[in-house]
Image: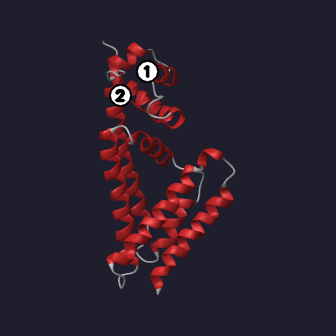
Amino acid sequence: MPRPSLKAQRQDAILDAVGHCIVQYGVGGTTLEKLAETAGMSRSLLRHNIGNRDAILAAFLDRFFSESEREVEAMLAMLPEHNAMPVLLDMLFDGEGNQTTLVALSLTAAAASDEPIRRRLSQWNQAFADTLTELLQSAYPKQTRQAVEPVAAGVMGIYFNAESLTALHGMQALRRASKQAAHQLIQTLES
């Protein structure tokens, strides 16, 4: 009886290693050597299971954007029908940081010189902004979209800024203040 294939498990391990390396070294510093070390595999196993560095990064991006879409869908499914904004702010700001956001911040740095990353990350960010806008529009139906969009952009900016400080550790007071700032910005829609 032949041995079961380990290819799917190895691919997952490689793509997990890509996420860790991107956060730690950036996209440019995510080399095959660092990936092999992080995944606990040889470079030849990386190439055998996915391909060269470009193929590995492309596979990672596909998985990253698919998983982040599922995370947002799960988050939206947990929001109550009424008074969703405080629950959303709890989800965004309470905790120690999110690996997805840390990867996104590293990808943002790489986007300046990488058109495929820039294009996909732009779409990802726009989808997040649209989701926030729709949630706010639903919570404040008397407000125009033109009034809601800047608030959604502000909440998104505050969130990403708070997440960018995660690696500094001990920034809980700033996270709490950021959450309060987002709450106060949302309250401007009550008038």
Determine which quarter of the picture holds residue 60: top left
**Amino acid type, callout 1:** Leu
Residue 163, given in percent of the width and then of the height, sits at 54, 52
Please tell me which residue is depicted at 35% across the width and 18% down the height of the picture: 47
Q: Secondary structure at mark 1?
A: helix
Please tell me which residue is depicted at 68% across the width and 60% down the height of the picture: 173
**Horizontal arrangement in the rendering, residue 135 relative to residue 94 (left or right):** left
Residue 185, given in percent of the width and then of the height, sits at 51, 74
Q: How is the image coloured?
A: secondary structure
Alpha carbons under labels 2 and 1: distance apart: 9 Å
How many residues crowd mark 1 within 10 Å: few (<14), some (14–19), many (20+)?
some
Please tell me which residue is depicted at 31% across the width and 46% down the height of the picture: 120
**Horizontal arrangement in the rendering, residue 84 relative to residue 138 (left or right):** right
How many residues crowd mark 2 within 10 Å: few (<14), some (14–19), many (20+)?
many
Is disc 2 in contact with disc 1, using a CB cutoff of under 8 Å?
yes
**Horizontal arrangement in the rendering, residue 17 relative to residue 5 (left or right):** right
Residue 9, given in percent of the width and then of the height, sits at 39, 27
Q: Pointer 2: what residue? A: 56
Q: Pointer 1: what residue? A: 32
**Amino acid type, callout 2:** Ile
